[in-house]
Amino acid sequence: MIWQPLILSLQVTVLASPMIFIVGLSVGIFLARKQFPGQIFVSTLFNLPLVLPPSVVGYFLLLALGRGSPVKEWLGIDLLFTWQAGAIASTVVALPLMVESTRAAIANVNPELEAAARTLGSTEWEVLRRITIPTAYRGILAGFGLSVARGLGEFGATLMVAGNIPGRTQTLPLAIYDAVQMQRYGLANVMVLIMTTIALVLLWWVRQLEAQQSQSQQQQPVENNHHETHRRYSKTAPPLRSRS
Amino acid sequence: MKLIVDIQKQLPHYDLEVSFTVERQTLGILGSSGSGKSMTLRCIAGIEIPTRGTIVLNERILYDSHQGTNLPSRDRQVGFLFQNYALFPHLTVAQNIAYGLKKLSQNAVKRYVTLQLEQLKLKGLGDRYPHQLSGGQQQRVALARALAPKPDVLLLDEPFSALDTHLRSKLEKQLLKTLSNYKGLTLFVSHNLEEAYRVCQKLLVLDQGKVVAAGNKQAIFGRPSTLAVAQLTGCKNYARIQPLDHHTIYALDWNCTLQTADSVSSFHTHIGIRAHQITFLDILNQHHTQPNTFSAWVVWTSETPHRMTIYLKLGKPPTDTDDYHIEAEVFKEKWERLKDRPMPWFIGLDTSRLLLLRQ
């Protein structure tokens, strides 16, 4: 009874994590480095899941994946009410955290470092791979940890697109809801404990990374104009700056 | 080796307009902060794009607005030493130095890095990270990194500004030694006159984005022709003038008539004299036989470790501490002999030391 939702949650996370990482990193880099018309619109769009009710996100996903959508009609893939749909819901809901963290971390990289790499013969791709991402990696990983934690706890949108089918799409958060509904508090307690522990560990790791990042940035004075946005998303867990 | 730069760039506060040619020697670009000297270097390196103009290095066109050529930084073969060194924090010292060495085999890279570390007295530091080094060591690593790909031109952007004073002269010596082995051209940006004077043979003086003087350093420092250059080369005393005849002027701000060795032209607007070139005449010898001798009162003094700056008022006693005409600079020993003399003192503004300046 407890293993099935746990395994499903892990399955969803394992599928959602690379999607969060790849899409979030690409979009974050793009938003930090490219100036283009409609930039604010695009970044707003990627932030939307953060403020929309999960049911609204779920509804949009139903439109995107369900009958009449390109995925269903052209590709013939029916994702609705599968755990894969749950992974997509997790990804979409967690993406804003990854995008914003990446963008802030990349924007904080000292532009002189990149300029230096270019004068030493690096192409733009090499600069990104050898200088920008390695210098910002702690911020990127922190965002990733935060997003995975968020995706793991996804409830509303998952319910809309994947349903709550025990053994097939019922992840831990949904199973907890069911257990409480059926007044099986013993089971609920165990699952709540598991969820809380995982979330605690992930957040602790994120804080650790953030502290290291701010330390290494003190060694390398840089202009940081994106700190405001970064702080906004840290509201759920205020930044812990080590001063040692 | 030849670098031709002729560029214009629109900046928020002024337009940068620089044009010069360098062959072989080290060119110093001198100017106060915000005069456009760093921007000039960044345009040459391809970090910034000029609005118009051309940059040609050894007949390779790096930038040409007419042809629409703008070579990316990576293809320019330009070495850049950044003000804060911009060492890659996630790479070791050895990796930093080797960063620009691409076409070499791993063994050749290793050999090169070892040799560099030895020459720059950084032996044994190859595995350290930049933040574990002192400022002086960081600067040497940055220099080695910039020189590793054998660039045609080396751009030094205020290379000593982030260092403590006592380190500067040591590193300056080291830099001059390294540069003497370097085959390419060097451009050295500084706001420190003495440093630029020591390191470079030729100077380019920038003010508000415009070249106000260019040529041999001796000529620029010895005979500055404009007020801006005189100020930038450290001349402290100026006065507006009214020409009286070919070798006589009236200094409006000092209320005195001065004779000059150079002949006065209608375009001269100011007169200047450097603080250390003012002479103090002995009391016994005050017969006013020499021209340009004036009575002077000490208004106030300011002390530095080895020198004394004396603010003087000519002709009559001062009313308050802001009421002075000229500042003179003397060594402490001289000050010891001067300080107990009764007022007024007698000072001489040597005719051959007076600088006739244009606005």
Image (cartoon, grey):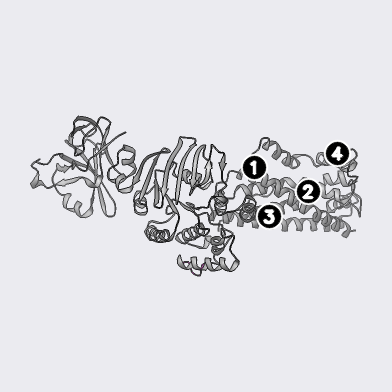
On the same chain: label 4 and label 1? yes
* Dots 3 and 2 on the same chain: yes
Q: Is residue B121 magenta?
A: yes
Between the C-alphas of marks 1 and 3, the distance is: 22 Å
Callout 3 environment at 10 Å: few (<14), some (14 to 19), or many (20+)? many
Residue A119: say if magenta: no
Chain under label 4? A
Split into 4 quadrants, where in the image is the C terminus of chain B?
top left
Residue drawn where x is 89% and y is 38% of the image? A68
- The mark nearer the N terminus, 4 or 2, is 4
- Where residue A209 appears, x then y in whole percent? 65, 56
Q: Residues within 10 Å of mark 2 (few under 14, many from 20)?
A: many
In the image, residue A113 sits, relative to residue B292, either above or below, namely: below
Mark 3 vs 2, N-terminal side:
2
Q: Position of residue A145 (x, y in %)?
A: 71, 54
- Mark 4 = which residue? A63
Closest to the observer, B106 or B60: B60
In 3D space, how far apart are the residues under numbered discs 4 and 2 (Cα atoms)? Answer: 16 Å
Q: Which residue shows up at 67% across the image and 49% down it?
A: A102
Q: In the rendering, which numbered label is found on residue B178?
A: none
Q: Please say whether residue B226 is visible from this viewpoint.
A: yes
- Mark 1 or mark 3: whose residue is earlier in sequence: 1
Please name the residue that numbered disc 3 is placed on: A141
Q: Is residue B289 left or right of residue A79?
A: left
Q: Residue at x 68, y 46 (%)?
A: A28
Highlighted range, magenta: B120-125
Q: Earlier in the sequence, mark 3 or mark 4?
A: 4
The disc labelled 4 sits on which kind of residue? Leu
